[in-house]
Amino acid sequence: MNYFPDEVIEHVFDFVVSHKDRNSISLVCKSWYKIERCSRKEVFIGNCYAINPERLIGRFPCLKSLTLKGKPHFADFNLVPHEWGGFVLPWIEALARSRVGLEELRLKRMVVTDESLELLSRSFANFKSLVLVSCEGFTTDGLASIAANCRQLRELDLQENEIDDHRGQWLNCFPDSCTTLTSLNFACLKGETNVAALERLVARSPNLKSLKLNRAVPLDALARLMSCAPQLVDLGVGSYENEPDPESFAKLMTAIEKCISLRSLSGFLEVAPLCLPAFYPICQNLISLNLSYAAEIQGNHLIKLIQLCKRLQRLWILDSIGDKGLVVVADTCKELQELRVFPSDVHGEEDNNAAVTEVGLVAISAGCPKLHSILYFCKQMTNAALIAVAKNCPNFIRFRLCILEPHKPDHITSQSLDEGFGAIVQACKGLRRLSVSGLLTDQVFLYIGMYAEQLEMLSIAFAGDTDKGMLYVLNGCKKMRKLEIRDSPFGNAALLADVGRYETMRSLWMSSCEVTLGGCKRLAQNSPRLNVEIINENENNRMEQNEEDEREKVDKLYLYRTVVGTRKDAPPYVRIL
Amino acid sequence: MEVSNSCSSFSSSSVDSTKPSPSESSVNLSLSLTFPSTSPQREAKQDWPPIKSRLRDTLKGRRLIRRGNDTSLFVKVYMEGVPIGRKLDLCAFSGYESLLENLSHMFDTSIICGNRDRKHHVLTYEDKDGDWMMVGDIPWDMFLETVRRLKITRPERY
């Protein structure tokens, strides 16, 4: 079978980069499995509890880059208690012990402690890249260890983490000899920043391409930073509440004009509207713009900026842009591929006319032929609009619609939105991710099961009538990997219909549904390769095992496939059946 | 990402957002099944709409609120020594004079801008840098941009 020596096959495998493809290669034959595993440099683990560090290292001894994900997706929305799990320390300890030459670590929704960061910084001489997304548990002291000890550090990217800011001098901890930084993102840090240390660091980092500042970096510092880093490609600005004096503004404009490589802009947590024009000169080069934190900027200022961004491919914005603004986007941004519109009024304090509606969505779908990913929060929707969107944009890969009021029907016909979402799944044959909302019956799930053949991730909230809904999905969507359901009337019949199915998926989440303790127990009984976790934070409900009522509904169920059995680090309110 | 439901239109049927008494709880429970986001648990849990914490916090910290074509700017007002404060929409006033007039009426005492003395309460504000400043030194528009909250100081006693 193998006409080539192993080295040649390995060389061929080097060109195969995607995890899915490499996983497939390793299944071809024993020889390929062996060659593949010894040459694999990047490993992606979608659920840190599906495998353990020892087995990982055993199989991939040459690994250089590890991606780990911990808590389930709904943890982003406060549905998973903080101590649930996802601790990275055991992984770092194991990797350190085994002398793996780790160079890159990417973590999502994991608990990272200062101790872990310290150990990480001391254990891997070639460590180059740390990316932490939606993690928690560490402080700026941990960052100081990384800065001080990782001599080869190129990338420190902190996205949306909960970091305890000790207002220390972590930026000072980068040694003067550190000149290799290509990416530094500390936008989520809440405390003060040693601006002088930051300026010195940026000045000695000629390869710095991505810099994302936190709110504490003032305008004049931004101008100086940009002046010594005109090579920046990706910039996240801080907070500029005060209207700048003319001199500062002029300096900023001069600095920005020089940044001809700038392609991506974000930040703007608080911006005096008069600061925005300083950025006009580079708008024509932008391919990515994230204004989703710019809560204080009114729609008309946003529109003026966006009108200049003709090459935009990615836009994240607040709904304060309004339908009017989305029409401008549709007219201007013909290259747009990804759009996210976030809600700016979560307390129901504002009048409706300011926010976006189905009108904006239809306009975008009509005006942006390359659109393939959308996340859209709105207060109202109609079937007609969704049908139009489906017709305009059959290329959606990700379609997430969140109507803010649960169970809200088509606001013109008062019908459910089954037909609208049905049109989406029928037209978009490549759809991989879908989130549904509004008033929905079992019918929409019939459509999803029938048409969404490529669907890998489905998020359901406040939808459906009976178990049939969930069954349509489980029976129909053969490629489903992650299913997350909340506040929907699906129960044991749906849960137990095809238990083997769950081993073909990464995970299932069900909260505030109709599944009972008894149903979960039956599920767990013959499934050694599934961990069935019941999360119950309410102390009053925790009874002795012989007293418990199997008919009692389970508040939160999280089940996932695993080859390493029950985890040992669960807190007391998580029961693993 | 968080929720307070008192103004939502669909909660117009009389769902009380305060904690239900035991006899009401079953009624509220069934109502919360029909109008899930009005359930008191959801208000506390802050799990709908599905947005991340950082965005939720940013929106909570937002001062400017649009209502139709107007804006409002609600700030907290405390009288020194009184633990419970008030909330005031600064956009409702045309300038310092009307602000002082209104505050004097609200707290039932004479309030001035200017130096502390034995007789009057003096109005101060916290600006965006976190510093406490005397009200009245800067133009009203600039004041609106920078003010975070107000404090009425007690008259000095020697």
Image: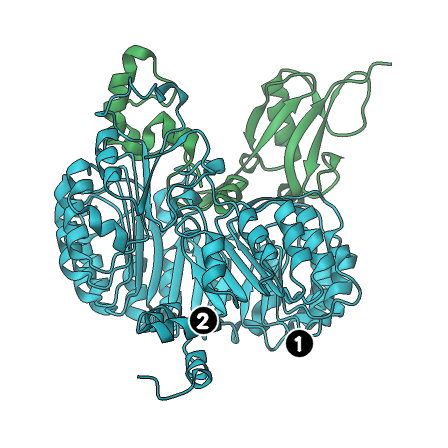
Chain colours: A cyan, B green
Locate the N terminus of chain B by quadrant: top left
Q: Quadrant of residue B157?
A: top right
Q: Chain of mark 1?
A: A
Instruction: Tell me, yes or no, if residue A345 can be seen here.
Output: no
Other-residue count near label 2 (Cα within 10 Å), few / some / many at <14 / 14–19 / ≥20: many
Residue A204 position in % (x across, y down):
76, 70
Q: Secondary structure at mark 2?
A: loop
Q: Nearer the viewer, residue A395 or A181?
A: A181
Is A260 left or right of A75, judged from the image as shown?
right
Residue at point 64%, 57% (across, down): A213
Q: Residue at x 41, y 72 (%)?
A: A34
Q: Is residue A399 above or below residue B53?
A: below
Q: Amino acid at mark 1?
A: Lys
Name the mark on residue A258. 1
Q: Which mark is residue A102?
A: none
Q: Residue at x 72, y 51 (%)?
A: A193
Q: Position of residue A212 (x, y in %)?
A: 61, 60
**Which tag, 1 or 2, sits closer to the chain's start?**
1
